Structures are given as structure tokens and as C-alpha cells.
Amino acid sequence: MIRTIGNILWFLLGGLVMGLAWWCIGLLAFITIIGIPWGRSCLVIGQFTMWPFGREAIGRDVLRQREDVGTGLLGLLGNVIWFVFAGFWLAVAHIMMALALFLTIIGIPFGLQHLKLAGIALAPVGKTIVSSDVANVTRAR
């Protein structure tokens, strides 16, 4: 119940705007054709940005306990390309939303969530979105 209330408040207090920003960047990536992998990730992270409570972004290598294409050297290269073309700007937008929310006492938890999303915006390649329960079990291993 608390997650639902948090997600609704989040959606109204910036989640929708930032989720749409992720989706717009994703659509631009799809247009370039070579950016399709980033575009698909933008759509997934955009949905996560709209409804973040009860889910977390974790590394795929942590989840699967082995590296794959996106978590190795190619993933690093993908994150560098992403940072240059879109990641920096999405991170700045999340930080600006966080600062605006920090001005209110009620908005502080939401501002912290924006800072987490800013970190994801900087380097999303190699990450996956899972429920908080799965993330906790994975960390316990």
C-alpha cells in the first residue's frame, strides 16, 4: 500500500515528466537505427522512472553472477557513448528535479530517488530493473 501511494505521489511530482524525457531520448535513439539498444533501454528505464518504488536497478553481472556483452568492455564503451549523447543531459535533469524537491520537506525522499536515477542516467548499460525483493535476495548471496 505504501509503495502504491509513493508511486502515485512520485508520478505526480516529476515521475511523469522525467519518464517522458527518457522515452523521448529513446525514440530519438530508435530513429538513428544504431541506437536501438539504447532506445529499448530508455523505454524500460522510462517506465521505471515513472513508477520506481518497489523496484531497483542492479547490474546484470550481479544478478546473473557472470559477465555478458553489456557488463564487460563493450558495456563500458556503450556507457561512454551514452554519456556523451544523452546520459549527461538526463542526469542534469534528474539533479535539477532533486534540487527542486529538496526545497520541500515532503519532497526529500523523492529528491533522493531522483539522485539515484541520475546515477543510472550516467551509465545505464549493463543494468537491469528488478523488484526490490529480487534485488535484496541477490545482495544476500
Image (tube, helix red, strand yellow):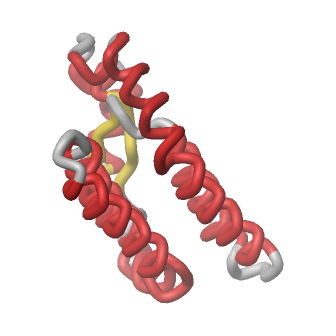
* 138 relative to 29, above or below: above
Residue 16 placement (x, y as % from top left): 42, 80
Residue 33 placement (x, y as % from top left): 17, 47
Residue 102 placement (x, y as % from top left): 78, 72
Q: Is residue 2 visible?
A: yes
Q: At 36% from the left edge and 70% from the top edge, which residue is drawn?
A: 51
Q: Residue furthest bottom?
A: 12
Which is nearer the eye, 25 or 48? 25
* Quadrant where the image shows the N terminus: bottom left
Residue 137 placement (x, y as % from top left): 31, 33
Residue 19 picture quarter: bottom left
* 24 relative to 34, above or below: below
Q: At 28% from the left edge and 53% from the top edge, which residue is drawn?
A: 29
Q: At 29% from the left edge and 40% from the top edge, which residue is drawn?
A: 128
Residue 24 picture quarter: bottom left
Q: At 33% from the left edge and 56% from the top edge, which residue is drawn?
A: 45
Q: Is residue 69 left or right of residue 74?
A: left
Which is nearer the eye, 55 or 40? 40
Q: Residue furthest right?
A: 103
* Quadrant where the image shows the C terminus: top left
* 141 relative to 38, above or below: above
* 77 relative to 87, above or below: above
Q: Is residue 112 left or right of residue 103?
A: left
